[in-house]
Image (tube, rainbow, N blue to C red):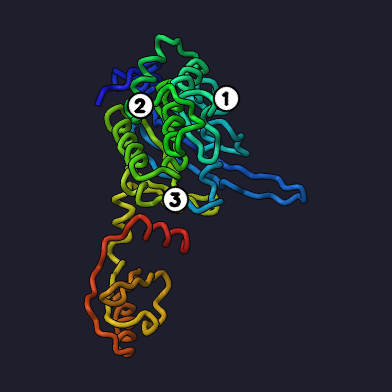
Amino acid sequence: MAIDPATRSGTPPAARADGRAALPAIDIASLTKVYERGNGARLTAVDAVSLTVPRGQVFGLLGPNGAGKTTTIKMMSGLVTPTSGTARLNGYDVARQRSQAVRQIGAVLEGARNVYWSLSAWQNLLYFGRLKGLSGRVIAPRAEWLLRELDLWERRDQTVGGFSRGMQQKVAIAAAMIAGPPILLLDEPTIGLDVQAARTVRGWVTKVAREQGKTIVLTTHQLALAQELCDRVAVIRQGRIVADLPTPELLARFRQDLYEIRVRGRPEAVPQPPDGFVIGTDDEGVTLRGPVPDHERLYGLLEQLRARNLPLVSVKPVEPSLEDVFVRLIEEG
């Protein structure tokens, strides 16, 4: 893969400029956002969130709707003022050093109009490049590199309004990257994309993180995507972080107590399983999958199945998916 003209040295511009390479890319401490309602009630959207993300990491911030993900992202990018706490990007305080801090990031926010639909893809990149203070001579090679990487070069002169949802999203990503920011915030980057477009974005995210040392913060409801891309995952629930671990370690925490039990029979004959179990069916019978923290519960469930005269096919521990872990963390906290 060709190297992005914005980062040919492989070192983020902020690190080269002022020796900040030893600092984390993102450092937020006790970040809190409280909204005042008209009746005097207070809604705490984000509650004392603290996170440190090193340079070059793909970091997943996951949570259900209303958990505080997007509010956290907007406070990090200077779009929402926190009630308390601090956010630093490559050492720059977002509140006190806003202009330096926001130059560290490119953001693609889900549900927002991130590009101008009346302009072509090429014109959008020229516009956003100039908005960031770049000259046309600097913008042109960066724009060409980004459009080629995201499979948009052949359609660079067509207006974005005529593009598919997936192509518009890729233009938005290119616009966020045109100034070569060392940090990229992606809020649901593959939502609405077809399979081919989503694959292009996934591969590109991995490449720019691994080969150019970009730091990427990813928020998504597509947990298989997060498991594939993220070096580390934090789960936010009701405004608070309930887990923050490297992805393999987070999965390993739940590996020992997840079992899959297969029986022959009809699903209506299966007794009500313990909390956290999911029942599935196929041509061979019924599968029960869920947490079994001790042998006593496992034997009890097997005894219930035997009492219903359901022939046992197999019992085995299974590797948890990020979806398994996420559901348990959200339900159990």
Residue at 29% across / 89% down in the picture? Answer: 309
Q: Which mark is residue 291?
A: none
- Disc 3 from disc 2: Cα separation: 32 Å
Q: Are marks 3 and 2 in contact (CB under 8 Å)?
A: no
Residue 220 percent location from the top left of the image: 44, 46
In the foreground, 50 or 263: 263
Residue 157 percent location from the top left of the image: 43, 22
Q: Secondary structure at mark 1?
A: loop
Which residue in the structure is indicated by mark 2?
Answer: 22
In-image side of 196 versus 104 (left or right): left
Q: Is residue 65 above or below residue 144?
A: below
In the foreground, 300 or 120: 120
Which residue in the structure is indicated by mark 1?
Answer: 96
- Disc 1 from disc 2: Cα separation: 21 Å
Residue 55 percent location from the top left of the image: 35, 31
Q: Earlier in the sequence, mark 1 or mark 2?
A: 2
Q: Secondary structure at mark 3?
A: loop
In-image side of 125 versus 39 (left or right): left
Which residue in the structure is indicated by mark 3?
Answer: 221
Residue at 23% across / 71% down in the picture? Answer: 316
Residue at 70% across / 45% down in the picture? Answer: 36
Instruction: Please identify the residue farthest to the right as the structure is shown.
Output: 39
Q: Earlier in the sequence, mark 1 or mark 3?
A: 1
Q: Nearer the viewer, mark 1 or mark 3?
A: 3
- The amino acid at mark 3 is His
Residue at 51% across / 34% down in the picture? Answer: 76
Residue 209 percent location from the top left of the image: 32, 33
